[in-house]
Amino acid sequence: MLDVATIRKDFPILSRKVNGKPLVYLDNAATSQTPQQVIDVIVDYYSIYNANIHRGVHTLSQEATDKYEEARHKIQAHFNAEKAHEIIFTSGTTHSINLVANGFASLIQKGDEVIVSALEHHSNIVPWQMLCEKTGATLKVIPMNEEGELVMSDYDNLLSNKTKLVFVNHISNALGTINPIEEIIKKAHHVGAAVLVDGAQACPHIKPDVQKLDVDFYVVSAHKMCGPTGVGMLYGKETWLNKLPPYQGGGEMIAEVTFEETTYADLPHKFEAGTPNICGGIAFGAAIDYMNSIGFDNIATYENELLDYATKKLLEIDGLRIYGNTKNKTSVISFNVGNIHPYDIGSIVDKLGIAVRTGHHCAQPIMDYYKIPGTVRASFAFYNTFKEVDTFVDAVKRAVQMLS
Amino acid sequence: MTIKDIQNDIIEEFSMFDDWMQRYEYMIELGKSLPLINDQYKTDDNIIKGCQSKVWVHAEMKDDKVVFTADSDAIITKGIIAILIRVFSNQTPKDIIEAETAFIDEIGLKEHLSPTRANGLVSMIKQLKMYAIAYQTQVK
């Protein structure tokens, strides 16, 4: 059982007011809030040992390097990567995907095929479209059904020996659907294709085991799981990371430089050109510690209760339709009421202190599937309360009343 | 009426509201009463690009004045457009270009001014002024 009242005290922002009302933060799928434990690490970094890493012989530089590498080990342990150098620090999920897509440009040829799912965020579509434009490869799409699930029988038909890469999110940001990635990975490997899983929406809810999943690449952003923005991770199997060429040139990623030739550094530094987000990386490690101190099993149990409760309460509103009704979903509710534009509902509930997302959630293909301009999306975290759900449902009712 | 006079009228009307709810209810009413744009002008070319609600604006010259019609798929946005049209429509290109927009602040709709609100007032005002600039160039 989670002691939510105590947990909430860890998050200073949750006690502020918005438009004169207590903040009800239900936009956790966009970014999660930051606990004091992580804020303290950020403050400590700049107050006590801010220095550039991996190069200085002085004490501060060594302290910062130790903490940064310690964070890498924390991330490795959390995702159960076999080796620490399989964890590459990036600026976030989008950067991680672009790094892999860019690397594959030299490994993919005309006539090859890559498969994406219909449930993707634009970040996991556009880099691959660019890759296809560059290489002449073909992009295929695993379709979705009315419930917001991937149609797996169609996936089987898309796979062939031409398939080189499959990329799919672990959990859909727009609908909350948990995709059957184990099956997707197994089947892709059967035809010799590599798989990249976008775990941005999964990392705050699930503790993935990259070895057990046998996934080739797994990418996340720290800010989705109580860490700071601007930092994330690319996990890649060592064999794949060795095959991919460096993404950006610069300091840190070299072994030796002359004007004739540069030899690249070993993993992970080959992909970490320039001074990284040192503080962010260390705080990412602290965020992982924090999430684990709460416990992912506890988080999942509690969030499922919140989801069930919110779903039931929202469905009591006349004309409300929820998009994405699979049983296998996380605490995200995407909905519309009658013909009311989601922007109108979002504007009014904002006035009541409630933060939700409205729009297409950077997943336009999903909105096109349902033929809607967008949805209102409420996404819940372990620090949200049942009382907040009530406040939110009342606010939606009030908005509907004003707008009808 | 000059643009300034109309703006002062709107400020006075909004000053009668006690809180945001009344302001929003008024805007929703305005949105519902906005004369719709002729369907033939509801084309992709006339959409003000944004990522939330769609806004269509059509402009034409009648005598020496610019007449705007507009529509949106979101009602609050429509209310905002109704206010803008009341201010800017039936004015000369020169007056539209030179008009100040500080009244938005005074009627408590400042949050819609944020450039990140994709259907914010900023891009709408910019678009109306662009039409005025285009017509003024033609007049010259």
Image (cartoon, coloured by chain):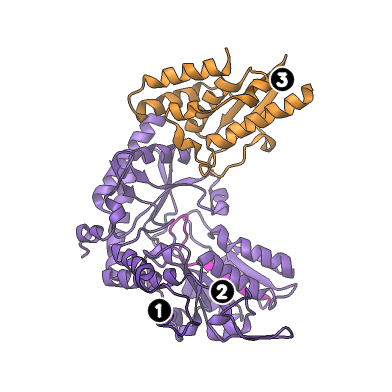
Q: Chain of mark 1?
A: A
- Mark toward the viewer: 1 or 2: 1
Q: Which chain is purple?
A: A
Provide the residue designation for mark 2. Answer: A274
Q: Is residue A57 magenta?
A: no
Question: Disc 1 residue type?
Answer: Leu
Determine the CA span between mark 1 and mark 2: 19 Å
Q: Position of residue B121 (x, y in %)?
A: 54, 34
Range of the magenta residues?
A162-176
Of circles 1 and 3, the one toward us is 1
Q: Secondary structure at mark 2?
A: loop
At label 3, which amino acid type do we have? Met
Query: Which residue lies under the disc numbered 3?
Result: B61
Q: Residue at x 40, y 70 (%)?
A: A284
Chain that is orange in the image: B
Determine crowd level at label 3: few under 14, some 14-19, many 20+ residues with C-alpha closer than 10 A: some
Q: Chain of mark 2?
A: A
Is the residue at mark 3 from the same chain as the one at mark 2?
no
Question: Residue at (50%, 66%) from the top-left corner?
Answer: A92
Instruction: Point out which mark residue A60 bears.
Output: 1
